[in-house]
Image (tube, helix red, strand yellow):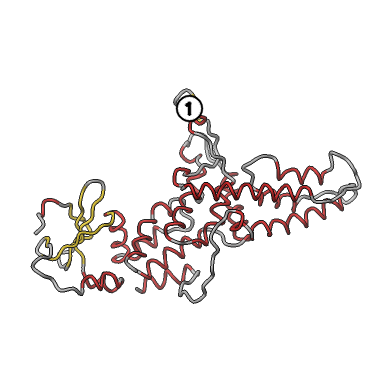
Amino acid sequence: MVLEDEFVRHKDLYYADGSVVLLAAHAGKTHAFRVHKSVLASHSKVFADMFVLPSTAENETYDGIDSVQMPDDAKDLEDLLRALYYPGTILSMLENRNPLAATKYKGILLLSQKYFVRVLQKLLRARFRADWPSTLPEWDRLMEHYASLSASIIPQHDAASQFIDNRMLEPASAIRLAREANIPEILPAAFYMLSTITQTPLHSLILKGTVLLWQPGERSARWGLLTPDDWLCLARGRHCMTDFAQTFEAQESQCICDSQNCIQLDSKRKLLKGPPQDFLRVLKEIGSQKTLQQYPCYNSLQALASRSLETRSVLWDNLGYYFGLPEVVDDQNDGDSDDIALVESEFIDG
């Protein structure tokens, strides 16, 4: 028998008519959840198999009923149980493109996979996949949204709101989630976004021990979440894209102006103005650049604009290769829908 004063009973997830107590540790304390075997078993084959075993005299008990010592973090277990008992709660938390989602909900996603809570697993995976662009038009829409955020920065007296990261997807935590939860679809966009962010050493961020050398609108990342393999992928991707840009600049495209100040030449050089460079953004700028038809550079610039947009699509399609990422197999028979509204409805219906 387990002594009752050893544990902290959860204030909400401790039902008087519950048939089993799940015990899990967090921050040095063991938390007790009194829940219903029937509820857990209806959502999870793992729990169903666990509870089909008959109770014996050797079984641990707590508060007069069976207890199970869980190896999971109590906070993650709480999130899982809350999602099963109150489905609307997690739907309200999983807002579109929550910057903290990959960190905050990684635990519950891993538990839903571990215990085969299939509907919840599908919901979380669909939400994370929907957050990260899988096509170039989706990427462009996200960047246009972020450009509007940057353009609207934020009264200087509101220091916290000046951190643009608080309103944008965080790529390093997304990479960690994708690796651990096997969601490779989000890796190309996450690695590309990370490649455009400058890694500033801590010693150069601090001036006289207190003042941060940071400007409103600058981006940062949770670099400490990356593994050595992630760093290799990032370095490979940056190297491959730099080679890609050099090839683009070196391609023949003679202009009749024959000047070192040629608008076309200046446009091509934008790609090589120093890492980390957002190649997709620069290629889009080159592709949309306009000049008057009477200018000597007009025809060459039009050809360059067309080639820039074609090159941009090639770059996007090859991001997985550049960063050395696992190939994504689109299995249409896996039963998972990419329609987030459909998956949410299925989750609510149980």
User: Number of callouts in the render?
Assistant: 1
Q: Compared to 7, does 39 lie above or below?
A: below
Q: Which residue is drawn at the image coordinates 23% and 52% (left, top)?
A: 25
Task: Determine the residue positioned at 26% across, 46% down.
Answer: 27
User: Residue placed farthest to the top in the image?
Assistant: 208
Q: Nearer the viewer, residue 12 or 43?
A: 43
Q: Circle 1 sits in a helix, a strand or a loop, which is it?
A: strand
The correct choice, above or below, for 215 with respect to 134 in the image is above
Above or below, 223 relative to 322: above
Q: Residue 130, position in %: x, y?
A: 51, 62
Residue 199 percent coordinates (x, y): 54, 39
Which quarter shows the C terminus? bottom left
Residue depicted at 29% across the width and 54% down the height: 75
Q: Position of residue 60 (x, y in %)?
A: 12, 62
Q: Is residue 193 left or right of residue 27?
A: right
* Residue 94: image location, x then y, percent: 42, 59
Comparing 245 with 121, the one in front is 245
Q: Which class describes the residues within 10 Å of circle 1: few (<14), some (14-19), or many (20+)? A: few
Give, as a three-letter code, the residue at label 1.
Answer: Val
Quadrant of the image containing the N terminus: bottom left
Extreme residue toward the bottom, this view: 333
**Which quadrant holds residue 77?**
bottom left
Q: Which residue is mark 1?
A: 211
Taking the spot 47% from the left edge, 60% from the top edge, the residue there is 128
Q: Nearer the viewer, residue 20 or 1?
A: 1
